[in-house]
Amino acid sequence: MSKNIILCGVGGQGTVLASRLISAAAMAKGLPVMSAETIGMAQRGGSVFSHLRIGDVHEDGSKDIFSPMIALGEADLILAFEPAEAVRMLLYLKDSGRIVVSNRPIQPVTATLSGSSYDPQIMLDYLKAHVPYLTIVDIESATREVGSSKVVNLILLGAALAEGALGFTRDEMRQAIIDKIPAKFHELNFKALDYYQNIGG
Amino acid sequence: MHQEFLMGNEAIAMGAIAAGVDLVCGYPGTPSTEVLETVAKHRSQGTYVEWSVNEKTAMEMAGGAAYAGARSMVTMKQMGLNVAADPLMCLSYIGVKGGMVVLVADDPGPISSQTEQDTRTFAAFSKVPVFDPSTPKEAYEMVQEAFVFSEKYQTPVFLRSTTRVSHGYESIEVKDPDEYAVHEIGGFIKDSSRWVIFPRLANMNHRKIEARNAELTDTLSDYPGNRIYREEISPAYPAAFPSNQPAEPSSPPDPFTVRAVATGGFSFTYCMETRERIRREAGESFRLFKVSTPFPFPEKKALEFLEGLDEVLCIEELDPVIERSLTYVCGKYGLKTKILGKLTGDMPASGENSREIVQQAIEGFMEIPFSTKEPLDLPPLPVRPPVLCAGCPHRASFYAVKKAMQGKKTIYCGDIGCYTLGNAMPLDMVDTCLCMGAGQGIAQAISHIEPDTACFAFVGDSTFFASAIPSVVNAVYNQAEMTLIVLDNSTTAMTGHQPHPGTGQTMMGEIVSKISIENILRGIGLETVETVDPLDHTLAVETVRRVAAEKGVKAIIFRSPCIALPAARAAAGKTGPMVVDPEKCIGCKRCIREIGCPALVLATSDKEPDEAGIGQNGPDEAGVAKAVSIKAAIDSAQCTGCGLCAQICPVGAIRREVSHV
């Protein structure tokens, strides 16, 4: 299974951990993985992304991924932590690709200052019109239900998992959580991962 | 060997550890910082690690250790190499005994830097050989080779990385501790004819270096990292692209036989992706020359690559290093091959490459028709410039100076760090920013040129230690009129919280005496040095007014910890966030207009901010008709409870959340 995944959002939203969990699941299956992400000034409230590429293993040992960067039109999945950021990354999506997006906007300070906050509904409507495989997650009720605002990343991962868009099984993702996250947070993260499945999509 | 998923910078660190590195020094700077941090975390018992006060000192440390036969590494970003240029230029002439690797991370774009300078060019300038990996896996291997190479030729060696190599991740095979290299440290042997750089020695060594580098162009031609990827022509595929018709004698030659691509660094990964894509579609692909040692340039290998070629397209980031070298090789050996790239306008002169830029350039060059997707007409997207975090004490410091100096003629000279973000609206408190430690020199100059201007220099605590102290000495001694503002948040914040001499801890894990900024300033001769908490807004403004009115050079230290430090976070969790009382808020938006905190948002009067947006079923009525009654609100997920906004609200509508009082 070769897979290209983009995680995107605003600095500080936890895209990196989600990326790390998918990588761990791929590593556990012995698949080659490459990724690239935003580090530095943009982390202070700017748009951030993580490109993640999982390759195939060939019998002759040859590779099929050379660059961690995904080309336009090559992403199988975009995991968007913010509606406008999903639209920003849309050109990367394959025709057959899926977007899993949080419906909660993060308004830039500049928008608040000028009194012209952007309307997230315009972004979600645009996605609905252009993306055949779209999953919008109502993140307010999800975090309320799960009981923590810190696990948006696992809620979105869980939605991608439930849609069959991740390429891993629930057990493989649970194992990645066990391997990469301290034990005291396991239950909370499992709950977040299962949330979307449990509400029946 | 075992598999690990490593960031490029982690791979460099693990490679250095596998090479048995004895001493690692550096100064933090994106995208290089994680190298030293990873060494500190995984180092073996005998390895010494420090965040040095600046890159110059770090370079001298690495040189000293290598004099004694130890293996040393020094880490920095490309800007830091300018600071360390003095010792490096001389080390190039003096040479080393133990292996010495100079890790410099360049920043095409630039993404987090002031310049797009190229360390490969610096390598040629300083005559120091450079290894240029394309992936974390290569970086892991090359750093180990670089140590061996450095010892063999007794010269420091560059390992040049770029942002995407340093911050890319790859699953790679790494050595287990029992596979690490072991070496003897001979110790420093006194020999003034070797270690003391007089002109006569410099002249003699210069001759030796030039001879060595000339010889290395041959030697490095055999280095496996300098590689030609040739097409293994399979008889199953037609030779010509794109048509399947048999080639006629009069038809132009197949582009794949007379045109080829040369590359290096991260752009190699883009070229390989394009090469494979073309192969998938056409059954064959182009010849590719990967240059892993751009200086000294592997000339013999280049000649082998150039054989039979009419044209070569060079794909690289930053300077046209490979392009110039190939042009030189063609001239030197009388080849007719045309070398194309940045200098000929065939590739962008500046900025980062991308999959698309490289693919389109190669497809055009190889005359391959490419199909581009119909561009989408995206709705206008919010712009997200980076901002000071909610609760950042720098915001309060800038705001205090702004209020205190309102209506006066001022200049605010900024510096390098998180606080450069004080330039953003609405604070607008950075008039200049040049390089590490430059703010004071600029402020002092303005004080001499425009005596009626109140001159301020803002400098962070880490930058103060790194490069500002000599400028303060200069300003005091030369009778300047200026106010120095030290923004002391007790860490090196922008690069992710590295310790510095004011923090009281070292990278070896020791708790040590802090070096006092106040004592340094008083020692230099400043009579007024005041320390104040910027979050006490009234006191902060009063202090700035009073101190700025004094004569000579005077300083205010705004001391409050970076809100992203774990201890500060924990403290904020205890005090809890601020809330706006919608009954009291008159909707003047003063809090929003004045300080631009990301936790301050707009909301309609009877709604919480989160509900004013959209719910599960789309926008509610209030969300659409938001012009009715807009008031300030606070995003509790972001607010750290610093309380600055509460001190600005004219009607006392902002208070600490009741449950936390």
Image (spheres, coloured by chain):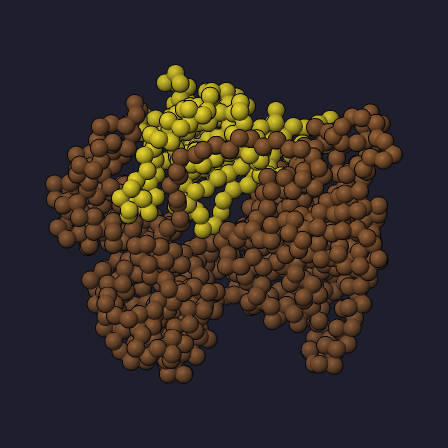
Chain colours: A yellow, B brown
Q: Which image quadrant is residue B394 in?
A: bottom left
Q: How many marks?
A: 0
Residue sticking out furthest to the bottom: B478
Residue at point 42% right, 72% down?
A: B442
Q: Which image quadrant is residue B5 in?
A: top right
Q: Which image quadrant is residue A73 in?
A: top right
**Picture coordinates of residue A52, whole percent (x, y):** 55, 35
Residue nearest the observer in this picture, A95 or B491: A95
Residue sticking out furthest to the front: B250
**Along the horizontal axis of the image, is B302 left or right of A90?**
right
**Picture coordinates of residue A134, whole percent (x, y):** 44, 23
> Where, quadrant-wise, is the N terminus of chain B in this rendering?
top right
Residue at point 39% right, 39% down?
A: B381
**Along the horizontal axis of the image, is A94 left or right of A114?**
right
**Along the horizontal axis of the image, is B328 left or right of B557?**
right
Would residue B233 be seen by someone viewing this image from the given angle? yes
